[in-house]
Amino acid sequence: SGVSPVSPIHVYTPREVYGTVGSRVTLPCTFWSREWISEDISVTWHFQADGSRDTTSIFHFAKGQPYIDDVGTFKERMAWAGDARRRDGSIVIERLEPGDNGTFTCDVKNPP
């Protein structure tokens, strides 16, 4: 039929991460798949501020390179802390601000 089987990726993040205003915090994201980790693996982080319905993409890792939101609230305060080959998609946020409180989601894709 030409359809390739799909294998799930299990993504693990802590339920809550705490930080204080002005400090730095690591947002851990690890993942596991039965399949080998492809060169096309991608990790996308999304943020939904407390009290908001809107979710925005704030960070993307693809083709071995990090791509950080260059216009939003996290501009110049975020860094890649992961290693995709070691199944780690973690990021660091520097100089925490009160508006950083919210829900962060790590999304991992391992094509094909």
Image (cartoon, grey):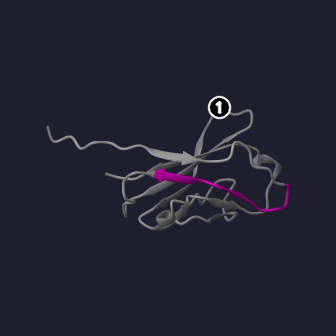
Task: Return the x and y of residue 57 as percentages of the image width and height.
Answer: 56, 48
* Relative depth, front residue between 11 and 109: 11
Judged left or right of residue 90, residue 23 is right
Question: Which quadrant of the figure has residue 62?
Answer: bottom left
Seen at 55% across and 60% down, the residue is 88
Q: Is residue 31 above or below residue 67?
A: above
Taking the view exactly as shown, the residue that stands out farthest to the left is 1
* Relative depth, front residue between 33 and 98: 33
* Relative depth, front residue between 30 and 93: 30
Q: Secondary structure at mark 1?
A: loop
Range covered by the magenta-colored residues: 20-32
Tell me the amino acid under the disc marked 1: Arg
Q: Which residue is mark 1?
A: 53
Judged left or right of residue 9, residue 112 is left
Task: Return the x and y of residue 108 as percentages of the image width and height.
Answer: 48, 50
Seen at 80% across and 50% down, the residue is 18
